[in-house]
Amino acid sequence: MKKLFVICMFFILGSGFAFSQNFSTDKGAMILGGTASFTSEGFEGESRRSTSIMIKPVFDYFIMQNLFVGGSLGMYYSSNSSFDNTDVGIGPEIGYAFGGANSSMFPFLKAGFNYFSLSTTNNGSKSTSSITVITLGGGMVFEIIKHIGIVGFLSYNIINQPNEFYSKSSNTIELSFGFYGLIYK
């Protein structure tokens, strides 16, 4: 009986904590959502094009008003006439959202680090490798109805792809859009 009481109290107190935030960037509030993007890239002097699709779910937790930490998954697929590439990654992120109790939209800045596992098929030959990505960016969340927001995010990504023969570095600028679930009272 005592065990049942402790379990019930845990759920009662825990549910009170989960909904004790008053607005979307308040301490204890959470964001659950993600962005997606599509890229079509042409190469100078070549007739081929590369097509890429990215899906990036995120979870962020406000450790204090406006300051959040969290994590993201990254799933990328790219293809052209000679190769297919699939990347799956995970990593932490930290950010700051501007806005308060009366804000229905809030700009934010964030930085993140992701580690990706790469699987490539090039002219029938398969290989695997890894890459790391540092992301710096900013965006805007528009709360369209209570607890649901549309997000736009512009980021600068620094990419490092080491392998046994050389290390290749590159960078990208990425514009992505998506939806955020804003979890607060």
Image (tube, rainbow, N blue to C red):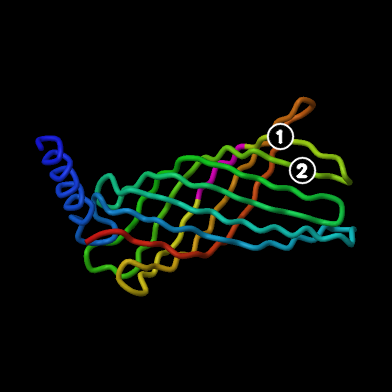
Report the number of numbered marks.
Answer: 2
Q: Position of residue 31 (x, y in %)?
A: 37, 55
> In the rendered image, which quarter is residue 165 located in?
top right
In the rendering, at what x and y percent does residue 81 appear?
86, 56
Q: Is residue 88 above or below residue 179?
A: above
Contact (CB < 8 A) between labels 1 and 2?
yes
Residue type marked 2: Thr
Picture residue at 50% right of the left edge, 64% below the top: 178
> Looking at the image, is 152 positioned above or below residue 110?
below
Residue 164: quarter of image: top right
Label 1, residues with CA under 10 Å away: few <14, some 14-19, many ≥20 = some
Which quadrant is the N terminus positioned in? Answer: top left
- Which stretch is magenta? 132-136
Q: Residue furthest top?
A: 164
- Which amino acid, by three-letter code, is at mark 1? Ser
Query: What is the residue that sits farthest to the bottom in this orientation?
Result: 144
- Residue at 21% over, 61% down: 185
The residue under the point 81% across, 61% down is 49
Q: Earlier in the sequence, mark 1 or mark 2?
A: 2
Reply yes or no: does residue 134 show up in magenta: yes
Identify which residue, 180 or 139, lies in the foreground: 180
| Residue under numbered circle 2 | 120
Could you tell me which secondary element the residue under label 1 belongs to? strand
Q: Is residue 32 left or right of residue 73?
A: left
Percent position (x, y) of residue 90? Answer: 53, 41
106 in relation to 26, above or below: below
Q: Which residue is mark 1?
A: 129
